[in-house]
Image (spheres, helix red, strand yellow):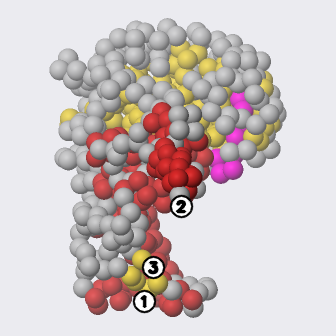
Amino acid sequence: MGSAAARGRRQEKRSAPQASGGEPGGPVQQQQQQDSKRPRVEHKTQAEADLERLVFGGGDAGLGGELDRVLGEGDAVPEQSDSGEGSLGSAESEDEESGGSDEEDGDASLFFMDTERDAPLGFAGHDGAHEESGSDEEQDGAEAAKPAAAWTDDDMENATVELKKKSRTRKLRVEEEEDEVAGDVYEQRLRQQFEKINPAPQWAAEAEAAAAAAAATAGDVQRVGHDLLQTSASLVSRTHALLPATTLAITRVRNANHAAESQSVVQNIQFHPTAAVLLTAGFDKTLRLFEVDGKENQKIQSIYFKDMPITTAQFIRGGQEIIVSGRRKWYYSVDVERAAVTRVGGIAGHPNINSLEFMRTSTAGDRLAFMSNSGQIHLVSARTKQFIHTLPMNGAVRDVAFTADGNYLWSVGLDNEVYQWDLRQNRCLSRWHDPTTFRPTCLGISRDGSYYASGDNAGVVNLYDTRTMRAGNDNDASAFFTVKPFKAISNLTTSVLGCKFNHNSEILGIYSHKKADQLKLVHLPTGTVFANWPSVSSHLGQVQCIDFSPQSGFMAVGNDGGKALLYRLQHYPSY
């Protein structure tokens, strides 16, 4: 009995330390010491979670959520989570779905688009972008007018899509309680959301309407011909009067860019060839588009290029595209209809060209001309952006100009020689020397090809008549000869920056940026300068660029103050 009781007491002593945590240095106590050394994980506060989503992406607290909120236009309803997951889980699921947006965006971070929401014309300023849809009958008529799809997926009608699950699809709901929709309905709402954010430009709709009207009247050719034969009236309008040679009827209207003035010098200003639209660009790295009516001149859109101060921006391909270049190895292409920006990595085969700032384009042709300091003109396709050919000159290139049809290119060099190039064969047709010009600075050709003007460093602009300057040399197309101007205009006192003809070759604008108010308008064919404008009260500033509207109804002047001055030429009734 005594020995059994002693064994029982020894077993109680042996089991007591194990129940209280084990002997010192035992495995249980070592595990507890390791656990006490580990840092305690505290739950994140709401502010920390929001900061994490803002820095690492995901959820709606970051820039992506704010962008979705802005582009949702108020159709998006407050987000509600049906599942028990937190906001961090939602962000991770969205990041997995995007699949690494940083690599897919490519050059999207190099530019930023700013769309005027209330503008009645433009990429995203269309009136219908913020209006409610019309009646069901109008929608049915619009759907009936659309061409039939070449192929349809039958499984789309049977598929269902959950709208509440992700924030990207919540803005597609019509009602807050709506959760699932059919696949074809989901596709239709995606299209509507895209058209709301990126509506078609108004001039594109007008072009489609004009094409439809032309197609509708194509079958009435015989009837129109019959109507023409029933009258003896003249078929040519003779209402256009000649422009007076001494006095110009001109009126100052509201600045074209009053809605968004440039933050630097306006380097480029140009009217759209078919629509009432004006572009401005400058060293503030921003391309801006405005609707021109002389009254409101509302802003359509602006595009900010983060890595390039703009020196040249011009329309090409009939106004469907804008080429933007600067003192960089690359340039940008802006699709006007799709509002898409593409970065072009320089000229293929010429990696040593460090600057593409000296560029000229043909509005109607299919060529881009980049000038280099070595006397070479590099031609690039306006459609494919592929290198075509190099035109060599004997001296340094000072300026080039395309003819209206885009088939010919004229260039002037520092050695006072002018070249005429045939772009269809990429060869020089003729060249001539002008001994009256001192260090040429610019070159301009009239739209009908009857005149060309050359400005020099002394402030003199020489005016030539192309119909008479080659008298006696027509037998030899490649002859080198000497020409003399029929008029030398010396009203400017500083280096001539540019010269611009209007649409019917009745007005020539010449300007210099060295001094203020250095702009003169010349009457053609007399070659006299209009005396009544500009006057002492015009206050033009230092003129950097000018342009005439397609029918010379307006003239725009860009100056060093970031303003695009707009003038109405009363002699021309049309825009």
Q: Which residue is mark 3?
A: 161
The percent coordinates of residue 340 (x first, y second) are: 51, 52
Q: Overall secondary structure of the magenta stretch? A: strand
Q: Which residue is mark 2?
A: 97
Q: Which residue is mark 1?
A: 144
- Check disc 1 and report its element: helix, strand or loop: helix
Q: Are marks 2 and 3 in contact (CB under 8 Å)?
A: no
Number of numbered tags placed on the structure image: 3
* Residue 420 is covered by the magenta coloring: no
Determine the residue located farthest toward the front in the rendered image: 1
First in sequence: mark 2 vs mark 3: 2
Q: Amino acid at mark 3?
A: Val
- Check disc 3 and report its element: helix, strand or loop: strand
The percent coordinates of residue 345 (x first, y second) are: 67, 37
Of 118 and 178, nearer the camera is 178
Q: Amino acid at mark 2?
A: Glu
- Check disc 2 and report its element: helix, strand or loop: helix
Placement of 356 over or under 506, stated as above or below? above
Of 434 and 344, nearer the camera is 344
Q: Disc 2 to disc 3, how far (Cα)?
A: 15 Å
